[in-house]
Image (tube, coloured by chain):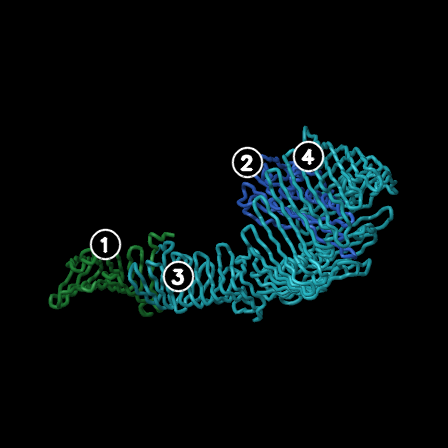
Chain colours: A green, B cyan, C blue
Amino acid sequence: EKADSSKPIELAADRGSLDQKQGINILEGNVVATQGTLSMRADKTIVTRDAQGNQTLQAFGNQAQFRQKLDGKNEYIEGQANRVDYTSVTNQVVLTGKARVKRGADLVTGEQITYNTVTEIYQVMGGSPAASGGTKGRVTVIIQPKPQDKP
Amino acid sequence: ETIKAGALQVEADTISGQMDSQLRATGSVKATRDNQQFEADWLEYYVDKQLIRAGDRARMRQPEGTVDADALEAYLATDSGSARNADFAFGQGKRVLRGHAEGLAMQGKGSYQLQTTRANTCAPGDDSWYLKAGTIDLDYGRNVGVAKHARLEFEGVPILYTPWMDFPLDGGRKSGLLFPTITTGSDGLELALPYYWNIAPNYDATITPRYIEQRGLMLGLEGRYLQPDYSGKIYTEQLPNDKKTDSNRSLWALEHTQTLNQQTTFGLNGRYVSDEDYYDDFGNSSTAATSSSLLREAWVNYNPGWANFNLSASRYQTLAGGSEQYARVPKLAISSNKTLWGITANLESEITRFEHRNLQDGWRTVAYPSVTWGVDKPWGFFQAKFGLHHTRYQLDAYNGNAANTLDRTLPITTLDSGLTFERDTQLQGQNFTQTLEPRIYFVHIPRVDQSNLPNFDTSENDLSFAQLFSENRFSGYDRINAAKQVTTALTSRLLDNSNGLERLRVGIGQRFYLNDDDITLSGAESKRTENSSDILSTVGGDLTQALRLDATYQYNQSLGKTERFSTQLRYSPAAGKTLSLRYRFGRNELLDNDGNYGPLRTIDIAGQWPIARNWYAVARQNYSLQDKKVLQRLAGVEYNQGCWIVRVVNERYLTDINQYKNAVFLQLELKDLSSIGNNPMETLRLAIPGYSNINNIADTE
Amino acid sequence: CGFQLRGLVTPLSQSAPLSFTTLRVAKAGSLDAALQTALRRDGRIRFEDVQGNTDAVLNIVAEEDRKDVLGVSLAGDVNEYMLIYSVSATIQRLQDEVPLPLTVTLRRTMSYSDSVTLGKEREEALLRADMRKEAAEQLVRRLGYLPAASKAKADAGKQP
């Protein structure tokens, strides 16, 4: 929901190490970051804080997970990829590496998906041929039929 | 992922969009929704309007066909949309409608409109002909296409314009355009442009304007109607002013049958022409031959179950070369039978008023009650019949004789019995059942003089197996032959054990007279000169899959000569390949309409055979060996280019003694678009046994 | 020479059993009387004409009478006709998913002259009745050669 980005990010993990000087916090093992209805699960997450205190999370995993409730609906948007970067102040999520975003019944897949959790605008790139096994990477979007137009 | 019905799947190099609102895909985009596929350089989708926009050059593939176009817009929910500069290929399998359209509109499931379009049904790249039209509406639900302001160009030459025309999309229905037939003949150039209009599923009309150079413009109109309880056909040809005869020439034909209720049916049928030479001038080889007397009749049939009542009135119009026929106004036929304890009582009866302009008029009442008793078994049957044939004539005054009443009553006894023997046998490695069916038929009818009775509707039948086993060799009721005779026959059949089909049949039969009482056609009593009839033999069957033989041989024992012999050998190995030879010999045959008898020998050779790749020759020669004269001749070629067929056929046939009619007809048939007027096809089907339309023969190597 | 009377020594129902026991003829058209005689003569089929539940229904789908010109006189008038009668029927058995088609086409020739039109009308009726008798015999005989139980199989041998 829109209100999420104003909330603090709570982090939990098996183990973590803090580098106060550069404001980098590295957590590993069942890392769970939650901010309001937004939650990210990963094997390893790097949390950095810039001068103004805005936090960005870099989550890695054999498919890091991303989940957030939609505004005003009890539907969720769920994403997963090899790496998920979330910048809270710009509500920008970038999923890279076999990325998948599922919103309600609709599904977006590709090599890299950038998604704004507030405006719900997204871009999907196929990625360079090298990254996706030689052929030009393909992306797909599946839009399920709306209830009213059930065939 | 399970893709639910109605889901849209878009695949591309890159996609950007807003969830639940819209998306834009670029880079060899492929989008599929159920059985619709889109391919384009870029594609946009608007979720709320369920609208797809694709360009610059988009391809849309639907069950009905494929469209490549610019500026494609498709509303998925309503199957509507539009496109510009579209190349399309609609239809499946061999039936494809291909072409280009400035504009294309999709108007719901399976229906499209092509605007300013050019289309044909040929293979890609084959532009030998095409239909240019303002609009073509394609409705794959009803499988019909409608072209408006349509012009047909063949090899670049515009040859036809029609404001409106429909055609079948699946070939199921007749097309709107029955292709023009051009004929040159004794009346100069003739151009017939039949035009089929499918008014409704059960009404259709064929309008045929026919220009005849030396006579003028004739209009032919055929209306057909088919309803659950009545159906029929009305046909008329009108030539208001025949330049050659300076008169009005017209033809009317009607066929109508109707079911009034469960037991009652009613019908009208008849032909009427303005003058007696009508068919010689306007008919074709078969109608010219069969139109010496034109029947007009109305009938009502009532069958309550225990009997059948048929009331009818019929009259003939006599044309050139025909003889005036009795009118039967009216005729009531009643027949019934009832079976009680194995005995069947039958009644055959008829009350008829005969009228003729210059022959004896009168009423004839026939009552022929009979009882039959029989046994039916798989190995044989027996049937005994005893009847009393009573006929009463109430004749009007005629030729100076006063009106009078005449009666004839004859007891008729018949005994019919037959056995069926069977054995299994093998032939060319196939199992057959061979039957042997002897049959004996005894008839006894005493002789009575009938020379004072008029002859309203009686003639002598040809000797056939059907006639051998009937009581009376005269058809009609005015003459009943005297009989004390035994007919014997032996039939053997070869039945294919895999499906029971009769592969070959051989039969021989003869009748033996036990006394020499006889009646001639004039009704006078006479003495027979021989004690047995001609021997009748017949053979018929498929010698091989492609070779069929039918032959009948009738031997006249008393003269020791062949009375009648006819044989037909037909070899039809494949579609488009058939050869037929028919030889007919008659020692003393009924030769013509004037009732003359005499020798007859004719040979009728006909064939359709490929002569080159996609070229077929059709030919027929019906030649009288006896009179050394060609009776009917036909020769022509057919060329199947794959997408169109052209036929050029010359036909020469007799319309009177030494009077031939010569006609060359040219006929163009466009594959799947125009079905052929039945005139040329009917002529070829009649002339050449086994003739097949070459439009559905695959391209021959 | 191997010939035996059909069905006399061993009844047909044993020597050549049919693939059904009761038959109803639906819509017999002009073949009604001829079919009844042929069925009675065959004897293997209990002929039901009520709406009872029979395990086979013979339906005469279409009949066509045609008259083609075969020979013409020196004046071009027809002097010989080829009379053609074709009937297409279907037999629907319980064990078949779809009715099996049966077609019979028969031909007779008849001389003709306009001088005896009315008489030839009667002779044509005689020949057509004879063709119906033979068509009924062929249809009933072929009921004995139906495949045991099968999906719809096109009728193997269409009459030429």
> Label 3 belongs to which residue?
B74
Q: Quadrant of residue A133?
A: bottom left
Discs 4 and 1 lie in a common subunit: no
Q: Which residue lies furthest to the left in this view?
A: A21
What is the secondary structure assignment of the residue under circle 2? Answer: loop
Kind of residue sitting beneath label 4: Ser
Image height of C33 relative to B131, above or below: above
Chain to which the residue tagged by mark 3 belongs? B
Location of residue B629 in the rendering, given as x and y in whole percent from the top left corner: 79, 61
Task: Give me the disc on residue A136.
Answer: none
Q: Residue A72 carries which label?
A: 1
Q: Nearer the viewer, mark 4 or mark 2?
A: 4
> What subunit carries mark 2?
C
Instruction: Say which element carries label 1.
Output: loop
Cβ–Cβ under 8 Å for marks 2 and 1: no
Q: Residues within 10 Å of mark 2 (few under 14, many from 20)?
A: few
Distance from Cα at disc 2 to Cα at disc 1: 65 Å
Question: Is circle 3 on the same chain as circle 1?
Answer: no
Query: Looking at the rendered structure, which numbered label has been put on residue B336?
Result: 4
Chain of the residue under label 1:
A
**Distance CA(mark 2)–CA(mark 3):** 54 Å
Tell me the amino acid under the disc marked 2: Asn
Q: Where is residue B237 in the image (x, y as percent from the top left)?
A: 65, 56
- Amino acid at pointer 3: Ala
Label 1 neighbourhood size at 10 Å, few (<14), some (14-19), many (20+)? Answer: few
Distance of label 4 from label 1 (alpha carbons):
86 Å
Residue B549: % across, % down: 72, 53
Q: Residues within 10 Å of mark 3 (few under 14, many from 20)?
A: many
Residue under label 2, please give it.
C53
Crowdedness of circle 4 by 10 Å Cα count: few (<14), some, many (20+)? some
